[in-house]
Amino acid sequence: GNSVTQMEGPVTLSEEAFLTINCTYTATGYPSLFWYVQYPGEGLQLLLKATKADDKGSNKGFEATYRKETTSFHLEKGSVQVSDSAVYFCARAIYNQGGKLIFGQGTELSVKP
Amino acid sequence: DVKVTQSSRYLVKRTGEKVFLECVQDMDHENMFWYRQDPGLGLRLIYFSYDVKMKEKGDIPEGYSVSREKKERFSLILESASTNQTSMYLCASSLGAQPQHFGDGTRLSIL
C-alpha cells in the first residue's frame, strides 16, 4: 500500500541541538519525497524535496537523503534555532493521480532558548 | 511566487448550514486540492481536481462536494455542516508533478 510514517511528537530541543525527524514510506517504485513545514498560524511550505534514490534535498540548514534500501527520508539539522519551531510533514507523491501527495501525520518541534 | 489565497482565515457556522470555502491560485496550475488537518491525523485529502470541471474524490469525501468552474478557483462545499466537520481546511495547487503550494488555511468551527 501507500503510506508515510513519521516519528511521533512533540519533540522538544534546546537551541543549537541536533535534530532528526524520522520518516519512512511504503511504495512501489521510487516516488518523489518531500518535507513540508508549517509555522504557527500558516499553511504548509515546501522545505525540501528529492526526486530519486540517493538524492539529498537541502534548504535552510535542513537535509534529507532519499534512501531506497531503508525506504526512509529522515530530516536532519545540525543546529536548530528557536525560529525552527513548527510542525514538519513528510510526504510522498503519487504521480499517476494528478500530483497527489500522501502525508505523514506531522511532527511538532519546539525549540527552547 | 505562487499565491494560493483562501477566502477566510476563520469561519464560524451553525449545524445544518451550507458552507462554501473558496480558494484561488494565480499561477495557472491545473491541479488543485482540498485537505483537512486534524491533530494526530495529519492532512487528509478530501477532493482534488486536475482540470476545469474535473473532480476526483480523495480519501474522505463524505459530506463534501467541490466546484471548479474556472481554472484558478476551487471551491469546497459542505452541503449540511455538522460538528465533526470542525477542522482546519487547507487548499493547495500544483503544476503537473511539481510540489504543491498551499494557502494559509481556513479554521472552520461548526456550532
Image (cartoon, coloured by chain):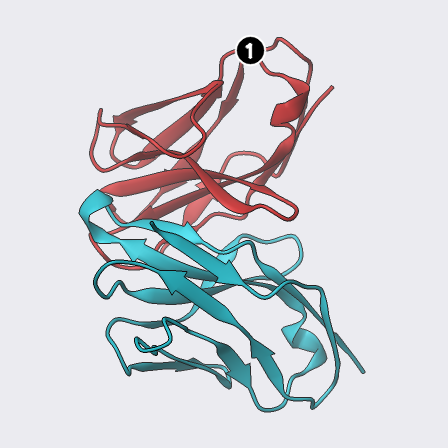
Q: Judge the density around disc 1: few (<14), some (14-19), many (≥20) Cα neighbours within 10 Å.
A: some
Quarter of the image for residue B67 reads top left
Residue at the image position 36 percent from the left and 56 percent from the top: B2
Label 1 sits on what residue type?
Ser
Q: Is residue A53 left or right of residue A21?
A: left
What is the display colour for chain B? Answer: red
Quarter of the image for residue A109 reads bottom right
Q: Which residue is mark 1?
A: B80
Residue at the image position 63 percent from the left and 34 percent from the top: B87
* Number of marks drawn: 1
Asked whether residue B1 is in view, the answer is no
Vertical side of B79 occupied by B26: above or below: below
| Picture coordinates of residue A25, whole percent (x, y) | 40, 62
Residue at the image position 36 percent from the left and 31 percent from the top: B74
What is the display colour for chain A? Answer: cyan
Dot 1: element:
loop
| Picture coordinates of residue A64, whole percent (x, y) | 43, 79
B103 or A73: which is nearer to us? A73
